[in-house]
Amino acid sequence: MKNEEKDLLPRTKMFARRIIRLYCSLSKTDTVAQVLGKQVLRSGTSVGANYREANRARSKAEFISKMGDCLKETDETLYWLELLLEEKIVPAAKLQPLTMEANELVAIFITILKKARGHE
């Protein structure tokens, strides 16, 4: 594993922890906030778990598959963050750093997948 890929282990875990803190800050009485919050909690915390699995892959195909899961879950997290913003459940200023990190992770995962597939 390359150094930059090792750096993603703590980065994806920190992303999950930030998502957890976001969820904990949501209104417990707003049904929509709770539904959207649980969705973002599920997808946002699975990014790091899938990344760990990718790094323990037993084959190139398994690595590519798990990295695809990382990309999918990160993109899904962006979707739920957008809904939290558009429904005015969380202010833009609070979501902007998380959205920026999710977009950066998407770009990184795309690059890793392209390299793994030999499409540099």
Image (cartoon, helix red, strand yellow):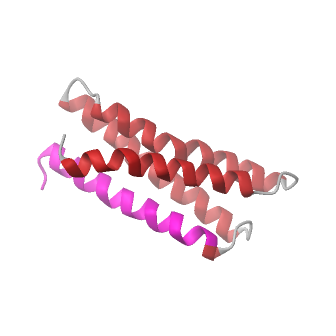
Relative to 65, is 18 on the left or the right?
right
Residue 20 x, y percent position in the rendering:
62, 49
Can you give x and y, in whole percent of width and height, for residue 75 in the image? 46, 54
**From what the image shows, is residue 48 above or below residue 110?**
above
Against 23, residue 46 (above or below) is above
User: Would you place residue 53 above or below residue 90 in this image?
Assistant: above
Q: Is residue 25 depicted above or below 12 in this figure? A: below
Q: Position of residue 11 (x, y in %)?
A: 40, 52
Q: Nearer the viewer, residue 21 or 69?
A: 21
The foreground one among 92 and 10 is 10
Please give the name of the residue rendered at 27% of the width and 29% of the height, measured from the top-left corner: 62
Kindly identify the residue that appears in the image at 64 percent across and 46 percent down: 39
Residue 116 figure quarter: top left
In the rendered image, which quarter contains the C terminus? bottom left
Furthest residue in direction top, as rendered: 58
Counting the numbered discs, the total is 0
In magenta segment, residue 104: yes
Q: Residue at x 88, y 53 (%)?
A: 29
Helix, strand or loop: magenta stretch = helix
Is residue 103 one of those drawn in magenta? Answer: yes
On the rendered image, what quadrant is the N terminus found in?
top left
Magenta residue span: 94-120
| Residue positioned 36% across, 35% down in the render | 52
Q: Residue furthest right?
A: 29
Of residue 32 and residue 26, the one placed in the foreground of this image is 26
The picture places residue 50, in percent across and down from the top left corner, at 41, 37
